[in-house]
Image (tube, helix red, strand yellow):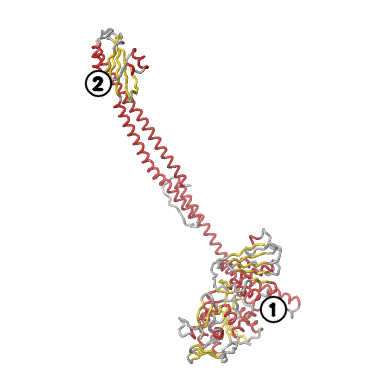
Amino acid sequence: MISGLRRRLFVAFIAACLASTALVAGIGYVFVRRAVLQRAQDSVLIDTRETLAHNVPGDLTAPVPEKTLQDVATALVRPDRYIVVTDGTTTVATGEFSLRDVPVGLATHVTKGLYFQRVVLHGTPWLVAGTRVQGRDGRPLPLTVVVFASLAKENADLHRIQSALTRAGALTVVVAVVLAALLGRSVLRPLRRLARAARSLGAGHLGTRVRVRGRDELADVARIFNESAASLEDTVRELRRLEATARRFAADVSHELRTPIAAMTAVTGMLEEDAGRLPSDTGTAARLVADQTRRLGALVEDLLEISRMDARTADLTLDDVPLAELVRECVTTRGWSDQVVIEIPPGLRVRLDPRRFDVIIANLVANALRHGAPPVRITGRPGLEVRVIDHGPGIPEDVLPYVFDRFFKADPARPAGKGTGLGLSIAQANAALHGGTIEAANAPDGGAVFIVRIPV
Amino acid sequence: MVAILLVEDDPSVRTGLELALSRQGHSVTARTTGEEALEYARARRPEIVVLDVMLPGIDGVEVCRRLRKADQIPIILLTARGESLDVVVGLEAGADDYVVKPVEPAVLDARIRAVLRRAENSPMIRSTFGDLIIDRAALRVTRAGVDVHLTPTELRLLLELTRHPGQALTRGHLLREVWDHGYAGDSRLVDACVQRLRAKIEPDPGTPTLIQTVRGFGYRFAAP
């Protein structure tokens, strides 16, 4: 955009310079040319008239003696001036010109007075002036004089002027180009600075400001830019502060909940063991408390895990582990062995954080068992790509983009069950910590597929 | 029945764990502060200490360090999950294992039994590696004729490593065999214990020759 604007400014400036130069030079040339020629012809005409007045006898009658014609011609001769004198029958010429060279238009006028015309003869410009000489009483004498005055000198002068003007014009254009470049740059520099600042602001450097100089329209724009950037920065800072507060609050609440939950978790086993010996409704109540205590514990742990991920304080302890064994262990320790089929080539070793990968697999399998249906298949291949496939109805297409959202429920009417609503987002965060991803999709033959990809 | 010293400052957690561990058949003595715990441990010598890391006064890590200085009593740390630093510092201070609060008593019981499990006997009764002599029957280790005092966990790790001399063992294998943890366990347990073991049996712990690190894999005990 800037370069286009700059080009337009440049072209317009050059065009204006060219036009004004051409106009000034053209008008100047026309005036000079007119003046030069005017002077040349004035001198010829005045000289001719005066010479004729002094050198032509007032009482000539035809035929005029050749000697007289010769005298008149000689009197009129000047350097670069040729004369043709005639009385109608006898013609005297001082140069190579003859009456034939007199332009027809001029020939018809000479009877009425001293007339002239500019012509080009043999490639050079001439002023041809002719007249029927008049006597003292105003009667025409039988004598016609034609003066061929060379305009070569004037023409050469005009040529010199022309070329000088052309050179001056060219110089003007060069100066204009340089000026236009400088001017364009100086006019556009604030714009470029503004563009750079806007780009930097867009890239997230919210402290970006531009220097405001002068009081023109660009300065106004710069001022508005600065005000907008400042208000954007304030808003973003406030939002970040609020977000940080919200996150810290979630983390603090979870942290505070942990101690009472630890105490309750310690005795849930006892409640369950003794529930059978309690009166039936008290027993049910005891089991409920035990159950929900576990769920509360899981929820708080998941919340804390998520806040650690958000705060980026989660660390990665990489190890070289056999994948099949790791997955089998994950499944057996949670008592899912008879619902899960593991299809991972033996001997496949991977480098990852085994504890975090265990969390990923555990959450995906728990999700598959909860929302899909057994048997759940776990496949793995080097690279690393692990798929968790269930035999349930699959995931509706409109729900797919949201399955990793926190506390997302596909069906709000359905009870939350045993899940915390955070399992999939925790799995995804753990994969991301490995530089990997988890993708949710549907298998061609129904059932949901979760594909874990971790770069090796 | 195991004589357990439980150190936990929060009264409800303390009561809960005391109840639950007693129900598992153990004899539990609970203390609230590190000072009380150290005093009790010196006088009564419990079989194992279950130690909260966050304690008022001297904290769990410091208690761990002081207990270790005195003798080889096994220690299990009670930590909050995600407080990674606690775990690392605690293991360096000599803890044998750790559990994350809130903990199911069944899990804690399993860990206690694992830490206290006697090392298995093997047909090879006596092994010699240079001036290091391991007597599997007496569960006694001497270096240049001097007794080396090892915690049960350190001893089991040494026995496991020396059962397969010259063979690289993964951290996962060691976690399973020594700590009952398996692959998803915390490999820092192994690393911390190897460091402590090296400090006790290597001629120069800075440049270990007996317990060699196999990068990105695990450890290997040098073949005799």
Quadrant where the C terminus of chain A is found in the figure: bottom right
Q: Nearer the viewer, mark 2 or mark 1?
A: 2
Q: Nearer the viewer, residue B213 or B152?
A: B213
Marks 2 and 1, how far apart at CA:
143 Å
Pointer 2 residue: A78
Q: In the rendered view, does A28 fall on the left or right side of A205?
A: left
Q: Nearer the viewer, residue A97 or A352?
A: A97
Q: In the rendered view, does B162 fall on the left or right side of A169?
A: right
Pointer 1 residue: A271
Tag 2 near tag 1, CB within 8 Å: no
Numbered disc 1: what chain?
A
Vertically, is B210 above or below A312? Answer: below
Q: Residue furthest right?
A: A280
- Residue type, numbered disc 2: Arg
Number of other residues with Cα within 10 Å of mark 1, as a class: few under 14, some 14 to 19, many 20 or more: some
Q: In the rendered view, does A447 fall on the left or right side of A303?
A: right
Q: Position of residue A329 (x, y in %)?
A: 63, 75
Q: Position of residue A341 (x, y in %)?
A: 68, 71
**Is residue A351 something that shows in the picture?**
yes
- Residue type, numbered disc 1: Leu
Q: Position of residue A36 (x, y in %)?
A: 31, 26
**Is residue B57 something that shows in the picture?**
no
Q: Nearer the viewer, residue A383 or A427?
A: A383
Q: Earlier in the sequence, mark 2 or mark 1?
A: 2
User: Quadrant of residue B159 in the image?
Assistant: bottom right
